[in-house]
Amino acid sequence: MEAHWRGGLNVKSYVDQFAREIFARLLDNYGPQGWWPGASNQFQVCLGAILVQHTSWRNVEKTLVSLSRGGICSTEALHMVDMNELEELVYSAGTYRVKARTLKDFAKHLSENHNLDLEEFLAQPLSNLRNELLGIRGIGKETADVITLYAGGYASFVIDSYTKRVFRRLSQDRHDLSYDNWQRVLTDGISADAQMFNEYHALLVRLAKDVCVLRSPRCWACCVRDVCRSAGMNDRIRTSG
């Protein structure tokens, strides 16, 4: 096990010990986040998961409004829309040609395998659903897990840059685990259901945006600073500066 995890034993032992306490602290401090943000149905979650790649959620919100105004409110409409028109509608999300192609490939997969029935697609067993998502060009593990968690309601912990940043700092582990090993660490350490994974991921994003920012983290304002192995070091840097 030690050879397999290499430096990852540090973050694993930390998660095993503190994961549930951190969740409770974050929930008490920030309250329920009610994610997926801005989505009123499963289709919008899927759109948002694809569109948010390499851009801010603010840009995604603009794009979702554009898609809605353009009549792209169902898998059928997405499958039928002209590619040039779709590229114009998703322009504000950045890398619009790539994202338009991914959206069309997503709709094509649903058409060829599920008669454009999104509910049928999402109702598959988790392993089948995730494998199908990963087989669609432009959808990687993080995007697939967003869809399985927030649209499908499965217990898939989303490993994004915010999650890794927070837990690396909390555990003071600098090793870069693979996506699968990160997910295994958090899933084994929390052993929760989809609702908790949903809330936990949203709370980690909130913490990363509010205080555990990329540069000059605001450790003195953090609700978990007393169990964070990096907080004291960052405070000393701030005081000496």
Image (cartoon, rainbow, N blue to C red):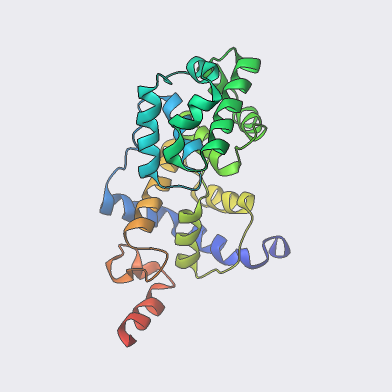
Which image quarter is the C terminus in?
A: bottom left
Q: Is residue 18 above or below residue 109?
A: below
Q: Position of residue 45 (x, y in %)?
A: 44, 31
Which image quarter is the N terminus in?
A: bottom right
Q: Of residues 173 and 84, which is closer to you in this image?
A: 84
Q: Position of residue 4 (x, y in %)?
A: 71, 60
Task: Tell whether 50 sits left or right of 226.
Answer: right
Q: Of residues 217 and 23, which is closer to you in this image?
A: 217
Residue occupying the point 56% across, 60% down: 12
Outermost residue, right side: 3
Q: Quadrant of residue 238?
A: bottom left
Residue occupying the point 36% across, 83% down: 236
Q: Is residue 232 above or below residue 150?
A: below
Outermost residue, top side: 115
Residue occupying the point 41% across, 26% down: 67
Q: Of residues 103 and 218, which is closer to you in this image?
A: 103
Q: Is residue 37 above or below residue 11?
A: above
Residue occupying the point 58% across, 31% down: 101
